Image (tube, helix red, strand yellow):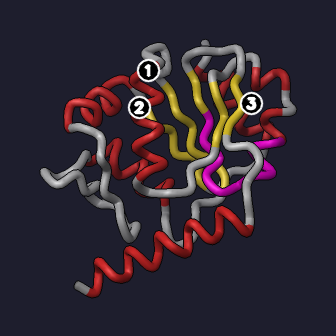
Amino acid sequence: MFAIVKRKIDNAVGKACEIVLPIKQECYFGKGSAIAICTLSSMDLLVDIAKTPNLMNKILIVGRLLSENKGIDMMIKFSIKNPSLHHIIVCGTDVKGHRSGQALLSLHKNGVNRHGRILGATAPYPLLSCSPMEIQLFRRQTLVHDMIGTKDLEKLVSQVSCLSR
């Protein structure tokens, strides 16, 4: 019972944050097709990448990932709709409390249990609503590259160059 009440409170706080601190841009589309960059909570990095033509010309999308559930569900659905997407670079600062980057890495490595809970995730609510088939397809189709903590554009340019060969 306590967990249900806590989750409702967390959801209400999240909605309040969206109103008080709106984030103008969630993602930017590039000209590539096989690589995505996820900047987690690093909004400045998101904008810096969007302003870097040599990166944007090689990637399909750059976006943020703030939640370990709805955000990852959206990422899975986007990946399935874009079958040429094979690489997701996870960089920037992980979201305190939600640990969405760690949850994404755990999903790719371990999958989910029969209730949709990401195995090995340390986030509070790593529960996905995607079907087991969607999750399996996502895990087969994409490689997730762990660069959590990296905010250096040159390192990201280098990684994208290696992956786009």
Quick check: 75 left or right of 155? left
Which quadrant: the C terminus?
top right
Element type where label 1 sits in the image = helix
Which quadrant: the N terminus?
bottom left
* Residue in the image at 81% along x and 21% along y: 54
Residue under label 1, please give it. Answer: 81
Q: Residues within 10 Å of mark 1 (few under 14, many from 20)?
A: few
* Residue in the image at 32% along x and 33% along y: 139
Quarter occupied by residue 102: bottom left
Residue under label 2, please give it. Answer: 77
Q: Amino acid at mark 3?
A: Val
Q: Earlier in the sequence, mark 3 or mark 2?
A: 2
Where residue 69 appears, as percent x and y from the top left, is 40, 54
Image depth: mark 3 or mark 1 in front: 1
Location of residue 28 with respect to 6 vertically, above or below: above
Which of the numbered marks, if any, corresponds to residue 135? none
Magenta region: which residues? 37-47
Of the pair 147 and 57, the residue shown nearer to us? 57
Where residue 59 appears, as percent x and y from the top left, is 66, 22
Q: Earlier in the sequence, mark 3 or mark 1?
A: 1
What is the spatial separation of the Cα atoms under label 3 and label 1, in whole angstroms? Answer: 25 Å
What is the spatial separation of the Cα atoms under label 2 and label 1, in whole angstroms? Answer: 6 Å
Q: Is residue 102 magenta?
A: no
Of the pair 91 and 32, the residue shown nearer to us? 32
Element type where label 2 sits in the image = helix
Residue under label 3, please give it. Answer: 157
Question: Mark 2 touching mark 1, by CB under 8 A?
Answer: yes
Where residue 6 appears, as percent x and y from the top left, is 38, 81
Quick check: 113 left or right of 50? left
Where residue 92 appears, as percent x and y from the top left, is 66, 52
Q: Amino acid at mark 1?
A: Lys
Q: Amino acid at mark 2?
A: Lys
